[in-house]
Image (cartoon, rainbow, N blue to C red):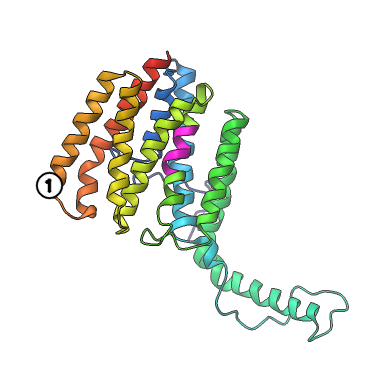
């Protein structure tokens, strides 16, 4: 029996994987570092925390519910129950007519919703709409640019929810890499200043790396090439900008990954071992570019 007093909703924040894993939170931080504007005051740190909540827990939860679990897909049942006797009706709708068949279908869907969908998926359905609303409200506190970027992320998540997000599919990993790395980087870079072409170019390098990693998990041909070329492109970009210390660190991290690769053949075993080196590479690259723009 539920207690008569207390809050109406509960929010549980639990880790989904190791904190030292490449993902939206680190991508957002690298985007901020790439602008050279590091928020060290209280207001800046509060903005940083709020943006992290937006790109990682909130958008991450929406991706899991809509993209991975396919909440939208479960809202289209394969078989509807018989319609109830009473419910929705249209005046003058004759049985067997188009309007009459529409009334029957709406009643059948309503019965299915009440008896099957809501008891099983109601909490997830409410979480998606509350999460999307919270994401948009939170993004508005940062300005119009981040609002539109958040709206774009929500649109991509909804698009991913229309199909199976199988990494083995032909388009596997594309939407996920945009939502989890490219857009968070752009959001971070847009927090304190406008996105620069150099920051976007570096973001694309690591987006290709992230996409390659996802497609490696999906068993795609030449996915490892994407994973490798993305990091090499980041090193070349830093060398072209004469950011030699950053390029040297990225090279050392890349070589370390190649050494680890000789011990693990399967992507499911290899990629978890590479996560700390990828995160460090991402942050060093962002910081190196930011030092140029200061």
- Left or right: where does residue 252 sit relative to residue 37? left
Quarter of image, res 116: bottom right
| Rendering quarter of residue 159 | bottom right
Q: Position of residue 171 (x, y in %)?
A: 43, 57
Taking the spot 70% from the left edge, 73% from the top edge, the residue there is 106
> Is 244 part of what is drawn in magenta?
no
Most foreground residue, 13 or 8? 13
Residue sitting at the far left:
263
Which residue is at 50% across, 66% downward? 120
The residue pinned by badge 1 equals 262
**Farthest residue in the bottom direction?**
96
Q: Quadrant of the C terminus?
A: top left
Which segment did they paint magenta?
179-186
- Regarding mark 1 in the picture, which secondary structure is present there? loop
Which is more toward the observer, 14 or 186? 186
Q: In the image, 170: left or right of 263?
A: right
Residue at the spot 66% in from the left edge and 77% down from the top edge: 108
Q: Residue furthest front?
A: 240
228 left or right of 261 in image = right
Residue 157 visible: yes
Q: Pick the residue in front: 69 or 11.
A: 69
């Amino acid at each position: 029996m539920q207690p008569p007093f207390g809050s109406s909703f509960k929010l549980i924040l639990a880790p989904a994987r190791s904190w030292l894993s490449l993902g939206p939170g680190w991508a957002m931080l690298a985007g901020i570092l790439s602008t050279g504007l590091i928020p060290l005051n209280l207001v800046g740190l509060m903005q940083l925390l709020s943006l992290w909540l937006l790109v990682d827990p909130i958008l991450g939860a929406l991706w899991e519910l809509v993209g991975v679990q396919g909440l939208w897909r479960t809202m289209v049942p394969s078989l509807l129950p018989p319609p109830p006797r009473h419910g929705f009706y249209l005046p003058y709708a004759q049985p067997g007519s188009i309007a009459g068949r529409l009334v029957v279908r709406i009643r059948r869907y309503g019965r299915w919703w009440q008896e099957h969908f809501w008891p099983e998926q109601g909490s997830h359905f409410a979480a998606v709409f509350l999460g999307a609303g919270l994401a948009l409200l939170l993004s508005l506190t940062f300005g119009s640019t981040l609002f539109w970027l958040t709206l774009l992320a929500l649109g991509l998540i909804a698009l991913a929810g229309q199909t199976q997000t199988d990494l083995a599919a032909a388009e596997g990993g594309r939407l996920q890499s945009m939502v989890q790395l490219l857009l968070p980087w752009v959001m971070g870079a847009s927090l304190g200043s406008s996105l620069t072409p150099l920051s976007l170019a570096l973001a694309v390098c690591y987006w290709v790396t992230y996409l390659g990693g996802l497609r490696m998990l999906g068993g795609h041909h030449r996915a490892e090439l994407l994973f490798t070329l993305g990091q090499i492109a980041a090193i070349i970009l830093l060398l072209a900008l004469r950011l030699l210390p950053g390029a040297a660190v990225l090279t050392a991290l890349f070589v370390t990954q190649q050494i680890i690769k000789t011990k693990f053949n399967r992507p499911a075993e290899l990629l978890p071992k590479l996560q700390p080196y990828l995160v460090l590479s991402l942050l060093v690259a962002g910081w190196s570019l930011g030092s140029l723009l200061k």
